[in-house]
Amino acid sequence: MKNLETFTGLKGSQTYTGEYYAERIDRNTIPDGKYLYFIRHTPQSRMVPEAITKDATLNFMASFVTDKEIEFSENNTILINNYEWLKYELEMIDPLISKTTDEKEKEYYKAYKLTLQHMLEKMPEKETKQIKRKR
């Protein structure tokens, strides 16, 4: 599934826009003029993005294809601001809790909601700018 996403870097206001794919893409299938990167998720949740990387062997979340090459520091990782992503996930979780009739699933969503709330509370105020989600 492909979505257009814009991520904002955690340090500075640099934004990165590209096609977001929920599956791992083979680098050999990327056409000339496109660049393949990966989104890594946080250790706390597979649903919350943490960084853009050149390769994601651990905590792979998605493939990210851009029209522009991204310049990385020596650690090949750009941390992203996930404040708006967390807020969006929180907005979506209550309808899921109320709709599901499966008690195990309901408990999973409740636990996920607590994790998201905890992550938001721990985020420093200066890091709460934006990422834009387009669905």
Image (tube, rainbow, N blue to C red):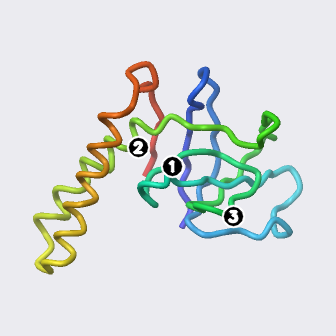
Q: Give the residue type that dot 1 points to.
A: Pro
Question: For this rendering, which residue is in front, 55 or 24?
Answer: 55
Q: Which residue is mark 3?
A: 57
- Percent x, y of residue 132: 47, 37
Choose the circle earlier in sequence order: 1 or 2: 1
Within 10 Å of the Cα at label 1, are there few (<14), some (14-19), or many (20+) other Cα atoms? Answer: many
Choose the circle earlier in sequence order: 1 or 3: 1
The answer to which image quadrant residue 16 occupies is top right
Q: Which residue is mark 2?
A: 85
Callout in the foreground (1, 2):
1
**Relative horizontal placement of residue 70, taking residue 82 as reference (left or right):** right
Q: Residue at horizontal 82%, vertical 36%?
A: 74
Q: Residue at horizontal 35%, vertical 42%?
A: 119
Residue 49's disc number: 1
Q: Give the residue type that dot 2 points to.
A: Trp
- Percent x, y of residue 52: 65, 46
Q: Secondary structure at mark 2?
A: helix
